[in-house]
Image (cartoon, grey):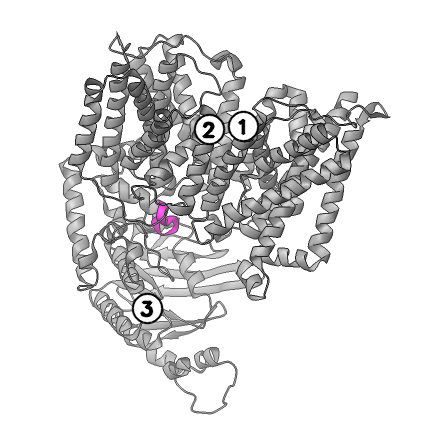
Amino acid sequence: MSGASSLPLLEVRGLTRRFGGLTAVASVDLDLADGEFLSIIGPNGAGKTTLFNLVTGLDDPDAGTVRFGGRDITRFSPERLAAVGIARTFQHGRVFANLSVMDNVLVGAHVRFKAVRPAWPFPLSLLSPFAELALALIRPGSVATEEKLMREEALQILSRFGERLLPRLDHPAYSLSYANRRRVEIGRALALGPRLLLLDEPTAGMNQTETAEMQSLIGDLKRSGLSILLIEHKLDMVMQLSDRVVVMDEGSVIANGKPNDVRNDPAVIEAYLGHRRGGKADAPSLPQAAAE
Amino acid sequence: MASWFDYTLNGIIIGNIYALLAVGLALIFGVSRLINFAHGSVYVVGAYAGFVAVTQFGTPLPFTILIAVAVGALLGLGIERFGLRPLQGYAHIAPLLATIGISFVLDQVVQLTFSPDPRALPSELQQQRFQIGSGTIGALDLLIAAIGLASAGLLYAFLRFTRLGWAVRATAQDRDAAQQMGVNVDAINRTVFAIASGLGALSGLLVGMYYNYIDPAMSFQATLKGVVAQVVGGVGNVPGAIAGSLLLGLVESYGIALFGTSYRNLFAFILLVAVLVLRPNGLFASRRQTPPEPMTGTFIAPSKPLHIPYGALAALAVAAALLPVILPNPYVLQTLTNAWLYGLLGLSLTLIAGTVGLISLGHAALLAIGGYASALLSINLGVPVGVSILSAGLIAAVIGTALVFPSFRLRGHYLSIATLAIGEIVSLVILNWESLTRGPIGISGIPPLSIFGIELDTDRSIYWFALAILVVLAALQFRLLSSHLGRVLRAVRDDDVAARSYGIGLDRYKALAFAVGSFAAGVSGGVTSHLYSYINHETFNSQLSILALTIVILGGMGNVTGAILGSVLLVGLPEVFRVAAEYRVLIYGLVLLLLIRFRPQGLLGTV
């Protein structure tokens, strides 16, 4: 785990989002160091996904700031966030249904296509769509090479999932199993070459074998040094993977620390189990508690 | 000042009539999330039912009204049965397209039964006028106002105080929950369609009596006016629909007072586009909210497209090129030339509606822009015809994209309605901008097709010219689809939220696709204008937009080969079988309806 002394990669301060009378996210502070694996847990409706949406630009905060690598990215559009290196997956899985597995992953690499998407300064940038169109139709050597390299890289990414996806490169995503669609989504996120990867319940709806497989893959990603922010309900997985765990309840952070500390935090147990239930001194620790 | 009183009164009366339409549309949208494009046909059928009752049987007014309402209600039940119920679980825009098909069929049936000529719809109330202050008010005005108020009151009471009305409101709020609570949502749908269509038919009857004039072509305008009023008031919002209707009636009436009759519809459509873009939830929505999920989604049926190797396509192109040598029959060549030009339109729409998922219902406007551009450039500026056609493509791309650009933020149905309105706006601007377009007279004496100064004066040379353009643009479109842009555009269509999260700027790529597609349509319009040598604002009408959509769905959305096949089948086959022109529209409507129901992926599959 990286030292706390270095500047955090992601720095969330006072982030707030209200829906009518409900404050879904209430002045949340959050730090994520470079290379850190941070998980957000909390009961349903705690505001985890809303927080995710605020960080990834799908929703705008009412107050607060988000900084990434020292740069203020509050209210950035999703497409700009992708360009600065933030990739996300979605809670219910959003693959491009009619695109092949390969094309889904290549779309993930969109921001890294440079030869075919010339980045020109302002007055010229108005013409860049035409340049992109011309380059796509003419396909000079640089464009063809870039496409070839990206395809090779996409193959490498897909080979991380063993034989799950490689035999199905040309299959449209809608024809895949649910678990495979979630895998495609993670492959697509990796193709962006992210500095920060946000995973929203990557194992939701998966059986035990699939969950274990996904967990080992995410473990690999962590070991490769990728910074990861994870929302997950499967607490065993969270406890094993995370460097640090943040617990949210009713829009606020109620605990923040190492997995073991959080697991035994009375406030956390109370949030999961309700107030003073049981009333025993030796309250169950979280994974068992949440399983009930 | 008397005239202002009259204009205000007239606006309110017309607004009342629109309200009868818009309330029905709002009710239907409320329970079924469908914008019913067959509503104007119900209105026409109501008017004709009244016409038959009055002229054949001499029914007194109350009976005439009852007959029109009953016929409308029955028709509504039929539309629900064939247009909506079989399509549950289909793409959300499928029922909307189905109602377009139904309206084509109904309008043509009315036209074939009663002829397209206008008829008078006499009423004993037409002569009676009362003096009020400095103005006068007719008995019909009073009747319409009374019926408007009475139906609003009855509807309110129904929704508010009856069990069935509660069930309607519950279904509108949450269909699934209502169903779980034991509400028979199919029965609710039927009820709502019957009520809405009864009101729509009544509206048609009243308009017919008010102007003492009915004709089958009123249908499309009526649908549009109802939709405008509804969108202005907030889609699915019944009181909003009434307010929107009155507002629309007044805006039109004052617009006529200030600028003249031919501008009337222009105001309606500009109001529509402005409200859609600026206040998509209507003028009276209390707070900003995102449209509910069912508004998203395009018409893409998952399917495995039939893969045709490029070699086979090239062989087909060569065969098509050799045809004039093998079979030098002028009739066949003219028919196929026509099919190639529609094929260009198909290429255009299959890219825009299929590949990037923007279901455009106003595509004929691009043909019109291209046609007028090429004609005016060659006549007014002496630009050589080949160059003028190329310029027409570019001009259509620029103007078309610029007009639609503000609407790119809209999704699903809303975008389709906006394109429909923009198409009407283009047609009305052409009609009214007389100094440039010669207005209703149209443009005659457009120079014949030529390249490099050589006139194309044989059927053969024209055939080759059209085929060559089609082959080149189709090849370019294949190349586009196989590039990174192909997958980016399809990603935008499949899931715009996910696409944005991966760095794809939606406006940029929608505009790119729209510009490329508009180019092909503009070229098609340009060639057509030189081929016809005369065009006016009705040459490229809204029926053409729907034909284009049928071509594209028939071939398979996004499918380049499919678009060409679709145009050969839909444009060529009726010629081969010598189908009379008035039956063709009927066939197009039926084909559209059957395709959506039974083969939404088209013949060759969506790409």
Mark 3 touches mark 2? (CB < 8 Å)? no
Instruction: Identify which amino acid the numbered label 3 is placed on.
Output: Thr
Counting other residues with Cα less than 10 Å from the Cα at mark 1, is it few (<14), some (14-19), or many (20 or more)? some
User: Magenta stretch?
Assistant: B493-499
Q: Secondary structure at mark 3?
A: loop
Is A241 in the magenta? no
Sequence-earlier tag: 1 or 2: 1
Residue located farthest toward the bottom when viewing the structure as drawn: A281
Prevalent SS, magenta region: helix
Checking the image for residue B583, the label placed there is 2
Q: Is residue A128 visible?
A: yes
Q: Which residue is mark 1?
A: B112
Q: Secondary structure at mark 2?
A: helix
Which one is nearer the viewer's eye here, B392 or B218? B218
| Residue at point 62%, 22% (across, down) | B118
Quadrant of the snapshot with the C terminus of chain B: top left
Left or right of B48 in this view: B327: left
- Seen in the picture, residue B140 relative to A22 is either above or below; the reply is above
Left or right of B351 in this view: B320: left
Residue B452 drawn at (x, y percent)? 24, 10
Residue B531 drawn at (x, y percent)? 35, 15
Same chain letter for marks 1 and 2: yes
Q: Gap in Å between the C-alphas at discs 1 and 2?
A: 8 Å
Instruction: Identify which amino acid the numbered label 2 is placed on.
Output: Tyr
Counting other residues with Cα less than 10 Å from the Cα at mark 3, is it few (<14), some (14-19), or many (20 or more)? many
Q: Which residue is mark 3?
A: A203
Question: Splitting the image into 4 quarters, where does residue A290 fall?
Answer: bottom left
